[in-house]
Image (tube, rainbow, N blue to C red):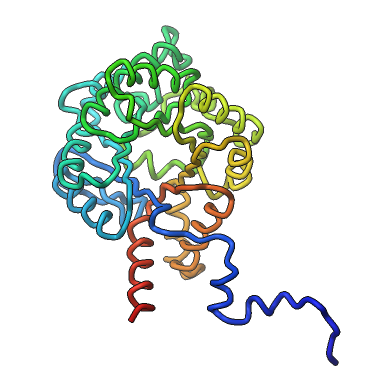
Amino acid sequence: MSLSLPRRMRRNRSSAPLRALVRETTLTADDLIQPLFVRDGEPEPVASMPGVTRHSLASLIDECGRCAAAGIRAVAIFPCIPKERKDARGECGLADDNVLFAAVAVVKRAQPGLLVIADVALDPYADHGHDGILDASGGDVANDETVEVLCRLAVREAQAGADIVAPSDMMDGRIGAVRAALDAAGFERTLILSYAAKYASAYYGPFRDAVGSGTIAAPPDKRGYQMDPANIREAALEAQLDEDEGADIVMVKPAGPYLDVIRAVREATALPLAAYQVSGEYAQIHAASHLGWLDYERTRDESLLAIKRAGADMILTYFAREVAEAMRGDRRGSAG
């Protein structure tokens, strides 16, 4: 039997060169941002995130060198602060010896061409694990008081050399306030990457292990400031508000479980759009592949391609360097 078909879709899939020629979405090292953790003291592995390390300043420099050599353009640095340094107001975040400031400075000296993104939030520094200062009752995060401290933190990060500051706290009005603070301090060229749509997700557990934020105090509840996973229109509104307040880049977090949100935000703004493939997404791919249930490399690569296909211009992912190295190896192989 021979079907009379004017269009056979399989023709465009019949060989690797043809599939490459008609491919609609391409992932490159330029799309990837490597999140990194830093601490005072010696490097130590993060148990819940295979292959991820809480770096010392020295090992952070080495890792950033490997990222740059692989073609990665940017890293995002998160501090891990000793428990005894933390307090209810996160005061150590503004201290001169905050390891984050030192990390930004040494990376910019060692790799001046590598963009450095610094997180702006109080959860790494606060003993209660919330992203801001608690109000007098202890039952909620005080929005405006928190924003005031975040502005000071963002300026300190810019002074240390950060190219991009990334408010991840989800306080109302913080983008406009941070923009004004940066400009007033002479950092008009420092970009703001806004965590515009950060959901109250169950996928953050390994990250909290990595930064040592521990058990989150209740009350309050992070769902009081992070977004409800049920909502999508709200994400587009958050992105639009942050754009109006001066954000240079907006972000959706998490990425994989929120591909529809990435698409909705992509259609709502012309700003560059980032997506964060979070620690839980990373850990579950490692766990399933370790058990032999998934092909590690193919699943890893497909997960990133899906995020790019949904509309993200850039992806924060713990896979960044290894994927970039694999891409470089593939290019060398094909060239040879």
Q: Is residue 27 left or right of residue 129?
A: right
Q: Residue furthest bottom?
A: 1
Q: On the image, which quarter does residue 3 sit in?
A: bottom right
Q: Is residue 259 left or right of residue 56?
A: right
| Percent position of residue 127, x then y | 32, 24
| Percent position of residue 176, x then y | 45, 19
Q: Quadrant of the N terminus?
A: bottom right
* Residue at x-position 53% and y-position 52%: 307
* Residue at x-position 29% and y-position 24%: 187
In this rendered view, identify the residue nearer to me: 241 or 129.
Answer: 241
In this rendered view, identify the residue nearer to me: 22 or 140.
Answer: 22
Please determine whether, in this image, residue 205 is positioned above or below residue 162: below
Q: Residue furthest top?
A: 136
| Percent position of residue 86, x then y | 26, 24
Q: On the image, which quarter does residue 10 sit in?
A: bottom right
Q: Is residue 258 left or right of residue 94?
A: right
Number of callouts in the render?
A: 0
| Percent position of residue 148, x then y | 36, 14
Please determine whether, in this image, residue 232 is positioned above or below residue 50: above
* Residue at x-position 33% and y-position 29%: 189
Q: Quadrant of the C terminus?
A: bottom left
* Residue at x-position 27% and y-position 34%: 162
In this rendered view, identify the residue nearer to me: 111 or 43.
Answer: 111
In this rendered view, identify the residue nearer to me: 209 or 177.
Answer: 177
Note whether residue 88 is visible.
Answer: no
Note whether residue 285 is visible.
Answer: yes
